[in-house]
Image (cartoon, rainbow, N blue to C red):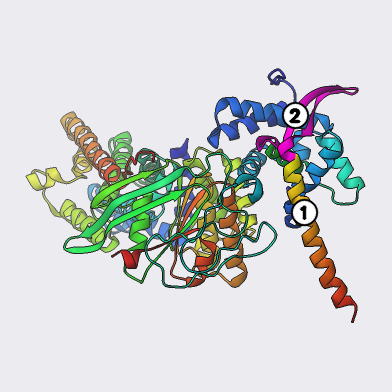
Amino acid sequence: MTPAPHRGKPESGWAGRFEDELLRLGLQPGRARELTEETTQQAAESATAPDALFGPAHLYARHLLTELNTAPHPAIANPNPRPAPGPGPYLDPGPYLGPGPDLGPDLGPALDPGPSPGLGPGYGVGHGAVRLRLAGVSKRYRRRTVFSNVDLTVRAGEVTAIVGANGCGKSTLLRICAGLVRPSDGTVHRTRRVGFVPQDGGTAGWLTASEHFTLFGAAAGLAYRRARSTGEHLAGRLAWRPAPDQLAQHLSGGTRQKLNLVLGELHAPDLLLLDEPYQGFDQGTYLDFWRQVHAWRDAGKAVVVVTHLLHDLQHADHVYDLGAAA
Amino acid sequence: MVIAPRPWLHGFLDLCLLAMLHERPDYGYGLAQRLAAAGVADVPGGTLYPALLRLEQQGLAEPSWHPSESGPRRKYYAVTAAGRAALDTQVAEWHQFRDGIDQLVTAGAAR
Amino acid sequence: MTALVVAALSAREVGRRRVALALMVTLPLWFYLLRREAEGQSIRMLTLGMGWAVSALTLFVVNGSRSVDPRLRLTGASTLDVIGGRLLALTGGGVVLALGYWVLVLADQRPDRPWAAGLMMVLTAVVAAPLGSLVAALLPRELEGALALLSICAVQMLADPPTLAAHLMPFWSFRELGTYVVDGADAGYLWRALLHAAVTWLICAGGTYALFAWRLRLPRYPEP
């Protein structure tokens, strides 16, 4: 084991920030220390400063954890693939080809069509761990029952779509998962680190995008500069460069939703709850969005998306039909 | 330095690393040089090192420490039995893929 | 600290609404100018107008952030950070405004006790902000909140000081202080005013925090 880096040397500032970010992202201190020492040694063997080789410490920390949690080749990690019940044959196109089976619109509640296309459910750290569990959850407003007896389990490395007709309570259910609304009955178990992306609103019209990053970053405990650079990096993944002076109210609907997405994941949550987040998206952005969702899934996060678009179902691992459960 | 994702290499990077390690054990920087020399890609550190750590995590490569002439000791990786099995599977898939594409390209070019 | 960031960004947000700011700054001036001949009245009206302006601004700022605050809570901020930050920004802005007017009053008139005049204005600003946020906490809809605030201010202006109704009004303290400042009354007025201001502030700020702690509460869902 190499000795701990001396804090006097110039690169050790990078190593310190790297380790801090790993700890902030939820890694055990021992493992964070290990990874920091490894990474410092890797830079040393290339005779390059870590900053030049890997980029900013806090961004590389996120990147590294995402890569380490990414699913391996299915043939190695999944010796007993789950057989797919339900309609349609199960195809495993492997990591090279595109989307998998197209699911029909008639789905019962909690139908499990099997692992989704792409690299499959995350097998990295914390695979399959339950991130959200609803048992017997109901919601009533005065005399009206919105829904009752909802059972839902969402695991790490999976994408769950919640579908149903308008007015069946999809948004309310998601808000219960987030903790913004209290259920009338039932229990909710949920991991602590959660991100919520509303259908619209949720932003401050008179602030710029960068100021939003600063604000939400501060709420998450991020320093101002780090919050801004993380926000801009995440925005880049959605093909968006926030203009420095543009107020949020002057953003187009689709761009404001990109802002909402970035704000939802800024603090690196383990569970992401998205309420029809694609309002105003053009086709390119829509594809970027699903690529982002797949990236989250492959990185071992759990994602729940409320949607009314049938087209979305091919991207999901599980589909829960709230209308059918009513 | 910008961490640019290379989607087309990403699926093949593990394959290349396992193949190189199978040929002879090496350390990170050495592997990067070999990839560049083979004309495959100029892989940035931010892509290469996480991939190596992932292989180690999955038990496909085994690390060992060796001193180097220039000072800092290096972490060498060697392929394990599981790694060799994975390599074989991936090589078979690669051959199938490559042959399929070649076939389509040749058929298209023959016109 | 998160509260400071919230405060700074709140201030920036409000600062961009130039017209609103201009109206807010000039509203008390109208009160002052229209009562300028009656020296005592003018200072009192100026202060009352400032109290209106600051509490109305706070009401709208707090209501306006209703969609952002729950998300901030989910991201990890505490209720104190979020609400405290906004109150801090608006109280600070109100105090700056008060000091500005104080200079104006000093230059324009020569009240008997100039420092007490300043105290009166600053106290009013300090009490006005949590008053606005309390109304926002009780009535989250903008129209209802604005009407409630208007009613409070109207009663404040019209009720006679010795009556119970006036005592319950949040700005009673400044009227007492006003008597002290302008009419050369004894120190008893000063201490009563300070006490009333402190109690009012505690009720308003405490009530605001309690209500928002309840509104923005997040359930402790256990880990699955």
User: Which residue occupies the foreground of this view, A5 or A304?
Assistant: A304
In terms of depth relative to the viewer, which is nearer, A141 or C60?
Answer: A141
Q: Is residue B93 magenta?
A: no
Name which of mark 2 and mark 1 comes first in the sequence: 2
Kind of residue at disc 1: Ala
Identity, as a three-letter code, of the amino acid under mark 2:
Pro
Q: Identify which residue is drawn at 66% across, 30% down.
A: A35
Dominant SS of magenta comes to strand
Q: Which residue is mark 1?
A: B92
Q: Dot 1: few (<14), some (14–19), or many (≥20) neighbours within 10 Å?
A: few
Q: Which mark is residue B63?
A: 2
Chain to which mark 2 belongs: B
Q: Is residue A261 left or right of residue B42?
A: left
Task: Left or right? Give the position of B99 relative to A299.
Answer: right
Q: Residue A227: image x %, image y %? A: 57, 44
Q: Inspect this view and state whether residue A153 appears.
A: yes
